Image (cartoon, rainbow, N blue to C red):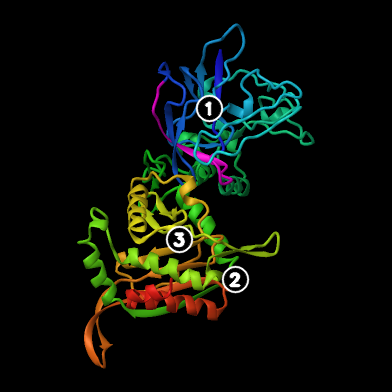
């Protein structure tokens, strides 16, 4: 029998993912939980395991396609045991929450989903769910439907052409794949998207497709000859390059807008002589406890933040708008902003406050390696309580970092520079660093933010002071 695998909810409220690559092809025999695809969410790259043991019958989406959660992406041919569909063992994903083509749960039957994917939701109990009626779709040639996504509507038949759907009916007709801005542009220009052929990934209709269709009748032949479509979906003109906003870039943009226009930011700066910290780092590199571990000013800054939070817990909190409460965390999941080829991500070290300096250094090394390899998971990105961004690696002295949504503070580390500095009553060349602290002024008063920043600076200026603060 044929089983469909629908794109699962990978957690964090994500509604779509991009197919990066298939690890299998049509006709391949796969085993249960064998990795069959690699997909990119708005936060991370995730490997999808096979929910069945069988033969790949059809790949519904091509690499580069952006697929909505719940849409079929691959079909399997699996063994039919006396007419009864095989049940995936514990840990296997059950497509469509226990449904497949022609399969419906019985009334009163409990359905369970076991989380075998990173970030996948908790076990779901369902009872007495209504039977879904099969969709009444007229057969269409595969080539004709490739640029389109058919909206799935429960309990109502979907007709094969838009003309068959009356305006008063509460269901959707077949709709071409496009983004909301592109659909608005088409509406403004009077363009029927069903008549437009998409040139984006997986047949996605782009702004250029709509604009080209709108002006095609009045343009001379070859009017768009200066434009070249690249395989990645980027459209290049003679004087500009356009890249679709998706993946990490799309998520980062939305998160930064939400943070900037929700939390009232305040930023403070402190310049510190960190010569003693650099001298300490040089000694630690020769220590047996840190053998094979990369050490940098970030290592000591992270420890300084963790120590300073003990005296300033307001900076490790969250504003709960729905319940009108301030949630103060009794643990620290320390986020570290990481620039990766996919864009900015902020994975966090879980329970960092419970780590000694050697453990923290190793966790920072592992976090950086994972981020650069593009293997950061949604779980690594969720649940941060306070963050650090190291802009000094780019030669920048200071900035006004934007808060990671849901967090009360973020500390920016500037570049370490050799500068003339007052030292023991004289002017000497010292190693100097500027700290930039942004905080949510709803949660953190100026005094609290200042005390925290002063504590971090004091630890970095004289690392031995940490013994008096713990």
Find disc 1 in the rendering and name its residue: 92
Residue nearest the observer in this picture, 101 or 273: 273
Q: Position of residue 126 (x, y in %)?
A: 71, 31
**Residue 30 included in the magenta stretch of the image:** no
Taking the view exactly as shown, the residue that stands out farthest to the right is 168
* Residue that extends furthest to the left in the rendered view of this protein: 286
- What percent of the width, then of the height, locates residue 380? 46, 49
Per the model, the C-alpha gap separating discs 2 and 3 is 21 Å
Q: In this rendering, which labeled residue sits more in front, label 2 or label 3?
A: 3
Is residue 17 within the magenta segment?
Answer: yes
**Mark 1 burial class by Cα count in 10 Å: few <14, some 14-19, many 20+:** some
| CA distance separating discs 1 and 3 | 35 Å
Q: How dense is the environment of label 3, judged by Cα within 10 Å: few (below 14), some, or many (20 and up)? A: many
In the picture, the disc for residue 443 is 2
> Circle 2 — which element?
loop
Residue found 38% across the figure and 78% down from its top: 458
Q: Quadrant of residue 401?
A: bottom left
Element assignment for label 1: loop
**What number is the disc on residue 353?**
3
**Residue drawn where x is 30% and y is 76% of the image:** 274
Magenta segment: 10-25
Q: Is residue 427 above or below residue 470?
A: below
Location of the N terminus (image quadrant):
top right
3D distance between C-alphas at marks 1 and 2: 42 Å
What secondary structure is found at the residue carrying circle 3?
Answer: helix
Q: Earlier in the sequence, mark 1 or mark 3?
A: 1
């Amino acid at each position: 029998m044929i089983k469909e695998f629908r794109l699962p909810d990978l957690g964090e409220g994500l509604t779509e993912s991009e197919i990066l690559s298939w690890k299998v092809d049509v006709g391949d025999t796969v085993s249960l939980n064998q990795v069959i695809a690699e997909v990119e969410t708005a936060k991370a790259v995730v490997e999808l395991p096979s929910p069945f043991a069988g033969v790949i019958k059809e790949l519904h989406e091509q690499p580069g396609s952006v697929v909505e959660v719940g849409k079929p992406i691959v079909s399997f041919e699996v063994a039919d045991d006396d007419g009864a569909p095989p049940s995936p063992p514990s840990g296997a994903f059950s497509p469509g929450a226990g449904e497949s083509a022609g399969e419906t749960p019985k009334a009163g039957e409990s359905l369970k989903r076991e989380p075998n994917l990173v970030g996948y939701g908790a076990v779901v109990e369902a009872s007495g769910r209504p039977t879904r009626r099969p969709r009444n779709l007229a057969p269409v040639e595969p080539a004709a439907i490739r640029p389109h996504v058919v909206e799935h509507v429960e309990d109502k038949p979907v007709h094969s052409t838009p003309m068959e759907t009356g305006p008063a009916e509460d269901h959707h007709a077949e709709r071409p794949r496009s983004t909301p801005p592109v659909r608005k542009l088409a509406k403004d220009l009077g363009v029927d998207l069903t008549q437009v052929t998409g040139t984006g990934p997986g047949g996605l209709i782009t702004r250029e497709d709509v604009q080209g269709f709108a002006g095609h009748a009045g343009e001379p032949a070859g009017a768009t000859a200066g434009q070249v479509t690249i395989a990645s979906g980027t459209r290049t003109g003679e004087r500009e390059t356009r890249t679709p906003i998706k993946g990490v870039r799309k998520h980062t943009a939305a998160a930064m807008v939400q943070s900037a226009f929700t939390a009232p930011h305040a930023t403070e700066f402190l310049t510190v002589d960190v010569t003693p910290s650099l001298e300490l780092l040089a000694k630690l590199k020769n220590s047996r406890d840190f053998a094979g571990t990369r050490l940098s000013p970030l290592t000591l800054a992270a420890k300084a933040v963790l120590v300073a939070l003990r005296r300033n817990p307001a900076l490790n909190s969250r504003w709960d708008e729905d319940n009108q409460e301030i949630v103060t965390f009794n643990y620290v999941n320390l986020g570290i902003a990481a620039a990766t080829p996919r864009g900015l991500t902020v994975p966090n070290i879980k329970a960092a406050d419970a780590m000694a300096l050697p453990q923290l250094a190793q966790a920072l090394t592992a976090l950086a390696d994972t981020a650069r390899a593009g293997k950061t998971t949604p779980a690594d990105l969720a649940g941060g309580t306070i963050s650090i961004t190291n802009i000094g690696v780019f030669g920048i002295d200071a900035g006004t970092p934007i808060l990671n949504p849901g967090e009360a503070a973020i500390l920016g580390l500037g570049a370490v520079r050799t500068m003339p500095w007052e030292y023991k009553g004289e002017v000497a060349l010292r190693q100097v660093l500027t700290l930039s602290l942004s905080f949510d002024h709803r949660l953190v008063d100026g005094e609290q933010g200042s005390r925290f920043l002063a504590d971090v600076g004091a630890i970095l200026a004289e690392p031995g002071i940490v013994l008096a603060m713990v």
